[in-house]
Image: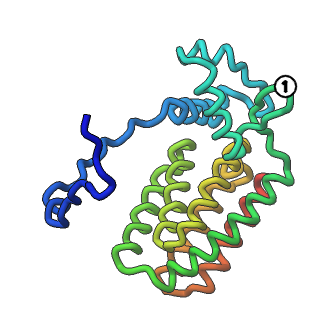
């Protein structure tokens, strides 16, 4: 067999050849199994099928889902990062229990982040964005008698406000905080007339946003969370 000499070099493809043969698009990977499992467990936690403080039986769940324990454990790690699950050494995984201090800290951070977002929206939102918030508020008013629907509409309103404000880091942090807040039995809106009070606070907030009054919007949103914490205590 004839060996290539050191001076024998393969011809390099021309720039034109590179341009003529674009990279083939890579197919999108399907959602990983552990992510699907994490979402199912997340919903079981939110619905109280898995109660706060309860031990998570990995073998039982693996059999229930028809999977091995490997993707289940990966899913539990995801939920642990989100704060929904607590991993205890040599004891396994437990659904996180939130204390009164936990709830107070979550409300405090949400008040800071969302009051800042409300001020930004009041100062900068365009007509279409304001109309989006108005429509979500109308939906919120219509769901006042349907607890779960009201809670979902309320969260959608707050999420839209953060999206319009445009700070993706605040959006990410508040999404994680709200996951933890769901561990609290979210009946605070339905205690001591809290639902009607919450709606009144939303109406005042929308008025401040429509008036482009940033500081009033900031103060109203902060008060909204302070009142929510009082009802949740």
Residue at position x 63%, y 37% from top? 46
Q: Position of residue 82 (x, y in %)?
A: 67, 46
**Above or below 133: residue 101:** above
Report the number of discs: 1
Count neighbours of disc 1 (C-alpha within 10 A) and say few if under 14, some if 14 to 19, many if 20 or more. Answer: few
Query: In the image shown, does 35 or 133 lie closer to the viewer?
Result: 35
Decide if residue 186 is in sight here.
no
Where residue 131 appears, as percent x and y from the top left, is 37, 71
Q: In the picture shown, does residue 150 fall above or below 77?
A: below
- Give the side of residue 175 with respect to residue 95, left or right: left
Locate residue 204: give its quadrant. bottom right
Residue drawn where x is 23% and y is 48% of the image: 24
Left or right: residue 122 compared with residue 129: right
Snapshot colouring: rainbow
Q: Quadrant of the N terminus?
A: top left
Q: Is residue 12 above or below residue 94?
A: below
User: In this image, 88 relative to 180: left or right?
Assistant: right
Query: Foreground residue, 42 or 141?
Result: 42
Residue corresponding to mark 1: 91
Residue at 62% in and 77% down? 116
Rendering coords of residue 222 (x, y %): 69, 72
Q: Position of residue 148 (x, y in %)?
A: 55, 42
Q: Is residue 10 above or below residue 72?
A: below
> Which image quadrant for residue 118?
bottom right
Q: Is residue 120 visible?
A: yes
Viewer-proximal residue among 214 and 162: 162
Which secondary structure lies at badge 1?
loop
Q: In the image, 8: left or right of 162?
A: left
């Amino acid at each position: 067999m004839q060996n290539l000499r050191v001076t024998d070099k393969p011809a390099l493809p021309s720039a034109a050849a590179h341009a003529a043969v674009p990279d083939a698009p890579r197919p999108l990977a399907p959602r990983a199994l552990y992510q699907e499992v994490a979402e199912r467990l997340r919903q079981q936690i939110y619905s109280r099928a898995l109660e706060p403080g309860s031990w998570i039986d990995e073998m039982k769940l693996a059999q229930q889902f028809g999977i091995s324990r490997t993707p289940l454990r990966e899913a539990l790690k995801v939920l642990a990062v989100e704060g929904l699950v607590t991993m205890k050494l040599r004891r396994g995984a437990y659904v996180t229990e939130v204390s009164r201090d936990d709830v107070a800290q979550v409300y405090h951070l949400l008040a800071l982040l969302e009051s800042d977002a409300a001020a930004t929206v009041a100062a900068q939102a365009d007509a279409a964005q304001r109309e989006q918030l108005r429509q979500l508020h109308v939906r919120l008013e219509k769901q006042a008698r349907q607890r779960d629907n009201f809670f979902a509409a309320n969260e959608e309103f707050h999420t839209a406000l953060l999206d319009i404000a445009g700070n993706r880091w605040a959006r990410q942090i508040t999404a994680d905080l709200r996951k933890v807040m769901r561990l609290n039995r979210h009946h605070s809106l339905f205690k001591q007339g809290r639902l009607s009070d919450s709606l009144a606070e939303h109406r005042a907030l929308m008025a401040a946003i429509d008036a482009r009054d940033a500081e009033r919007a900031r103060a109203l949103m902060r008060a909204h969370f302070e009142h929510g914490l009082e009802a949740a205590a």
